[in-house]
Image (spheres, grey):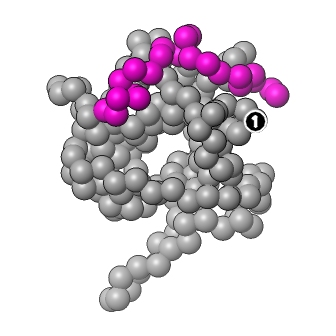
């Protein structure tokens, strides 16, 4: 398992070792010992899975506020997505900056997104399944979002020629500067 840092503190790309033969393949998607050796200590409490039927579906940018903030380990098990993490920690040197990566069933990469970051993804194919582990249970009272096309964040979503398929909640999400957020860098 290869764990690589990104340009955002605490955001990592995970590349599992894949062992294949004539039957197919095998990989570990999470190994507590390997993560701990990199200084990442996590106790996951919930696994989530989503299905998106059409290319261009956009989910996000989502986060849970403290005290129910969530760290996420995201992977795409069917199809392909463009996955994004946005630093929303007030006072952070990378506040409002984003990191994006293509995750797919084929490349088997994963993205580790720490607390204090918003998360979203756009489907690049039809029939997409995304799975992610979290270290805190879902808490609707702490659930928040930021508009997917906030110009101050300026995510370069790969599909730009059509309006993405959005939920009503995501269509109405506030801009970063208007969003309720209690994350402070260094706390």
Foreground residue, 131 or 93?
131
Magenta span main SS: loop
Q: Is residue 35 left or right of residue 60?
A: right
Q: Is residue 17 left or right of residue 3?
A: left
Q: Is residue 117 visible?
A: yes
Query: Looking at the figure, which quarter contains the C terminus?
Result: top right
Q: How many marks?
A: 1
Question: Which residue does the image show at 34% across and 54% down from the upper left?
Answer: 51
- The picture places residue 124, in percent across and down from the top left corner, at 26, 44
Estimate how packed mark 1 is, as few (under 14), some (14 to 19) or many (20 or more) residues with alpha carbons within 10 Å: few
Q: Is residue 96 magenta?
A: no
Q: Is residue 177 magenta?
A: yes
Give the quarter of the image for residue 105: bottom left
Q: Position of residue 23 (x, y in %)?
A: 35, 88
Front residue of this view, candidates 183 and 8: 183
| Residue 110 visible in the current orientation | no
Q: Secondary structure at mark 1?
A: loop
Q: Where does the magenta region start and end?
A: 166-187
Give above or below for 38 relative to 143.
Answer: below
x and y percentages locating residue 167 in the rendered image? 34, 33
35 sits left or right of 14 in the view: right
Viewer-closest of 79 and 172: 172
The residue where tag 1 is placed is 67
Which one is in front, 26 or 176? 176
Q: In this view, which residue lies farthest toward the bottom?
A: 22
Tell me the quarter of the image containing the N terminus.
bottom right
The location of residue 29, given as percent across then percent down, is: 55, 66
Residue appearing at x 30%, y 44% in the figure: 123
């Amino acid at each position: 398992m290869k764990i690589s840092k990104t340009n955002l503190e605490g955001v990592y790309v995970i590349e599992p070792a894949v062992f294949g033969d004539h039957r197919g393949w095998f990989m570990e998607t999470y190994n507590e010992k390997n993560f701990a050796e990199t200084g990442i200590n996590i106790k996951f409490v919930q696994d989530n899975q989503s299905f998106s039927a059409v290319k261009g579906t956009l989910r996000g940018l989502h986060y849970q506020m403290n005290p129910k903030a969530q760290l996420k380990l995201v992977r795409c098990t069917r199809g392909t997505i463009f996955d994004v993490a946005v630093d929303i920690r007030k006072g952070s040197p990378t506040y409002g900056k984003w990191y994006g990566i293509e995750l797919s069933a084929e490349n088997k990469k994963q993205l580790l997104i720490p607390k204090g970051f918003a998360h979203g993804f756009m489907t690049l194919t039809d029939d997409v399944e995304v799975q992610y582990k979290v270290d805190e249970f879902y808490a609707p009272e702490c659930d928040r979002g930021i508009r997917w096309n906030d110009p101050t964040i300026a995510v370069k979503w790969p599909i730009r020629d059509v309006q993405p398929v959005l939920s009503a909640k995501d269509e109405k999400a506030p801009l970063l500067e208007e969003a309720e957020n209690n994350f402070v860098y260094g706390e």
